[in-house]
Image (cartoon, rainbow, N blue to C red):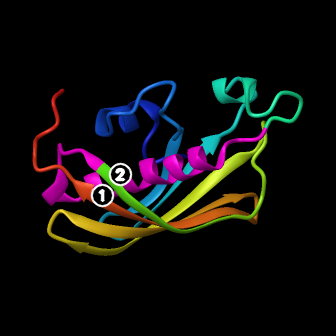
């Protein structure tokens, strides 16, 4: 059972196909942590070129997926409701396992700190019980209200 489905995610963050990578939110402790899932299928458009005959999810798209999960967590905080979150930096990114069609990515994101409209999160992506990627992301929240 999911906490948020794809439609509810699209109601919260502006990402759309082909750049929306989160299928569902599994659990959330607002202002603290979130877990979410992405099902990786052979139908993803990036597998056409990355790499023919050996499809592997690009690492930067795993990072983007983490940023989307972080955005959901941040935007569920009352002070950031109806805003847009932007990634400010990526630190200590490590790729530990190739992500291939058929894999299910599970994300765990925790807020490290928030100061004003900026902060940082720690992110880990798993395939099964194996760590696929980890990184620390800095974020900035726009002061402007998001247009519907």
Q: Position of residue 52 (x, y in %)?
A: 83, 27
Relative vertical location of residue 46 with respect to residue 21 in this rendering, above or below: above
Q: Nearer the viewer, residue 46 or 13?
A: 46
Question: In this picture, which residue range is highlighted in magenta?
Answer: 56-85
The rendered magenta stretch, by its main secondary structure, is classed as helix
For label 2, the residue is 71
Q: CA distance from mark 1 to mark 2?
A: 5 Å
Q: Nearer the viewer, residue 89 or 142?
A: 89
Queried whether the magenta region covers residue 71, the answer comes back as: yes
Q: Are marks 1 and 2 in contact (CB under 8 Å)?
A: yes
| Above or below, comparing residue 41 to residue 126 in the picture | above
Tell me the quarter of the picture where residue 80 sits: bottom left
Q: Is residue 13 part of the magenta span, yes or no?
A: no
Tell me the quarter of the picture where residue 58 sits.
Answer: top right
Q: Secondary structure at mark 2?
A: helix
**Which quadrant: the C terminus?**
top left
């Amino acid at each position: 059972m999911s906490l948020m489905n794809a439609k509810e995610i699209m109601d919260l963050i502006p990402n759309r196909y082909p750049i929306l990578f989160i299928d569902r939110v599994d659990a959330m402790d607002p202002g603290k942590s979130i877990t979410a899932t992405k099902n990786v299928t052979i139908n993803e458009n990036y597998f056409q070129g990355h790499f023919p005959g050996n499809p592997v999810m690009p690492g930067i798209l795993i990072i983007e997926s983490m940023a989307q999960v972080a955005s959901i967590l941040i935007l569920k905080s009352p002070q950031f409701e109806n805003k847009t979150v932007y990634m400010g930096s990526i630190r200590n990114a490590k790729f530990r396992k190739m992500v291939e069609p058929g894999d299910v990515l599970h994300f765990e994101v925790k807020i490290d700190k928030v100061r004003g409209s900026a902060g940082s999160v720690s992110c880990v992506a798993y395939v099964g019980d194996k760590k696929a990627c980890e990184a620390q992301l800095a974020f900035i929240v726009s002061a402007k209200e998001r247009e519907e």
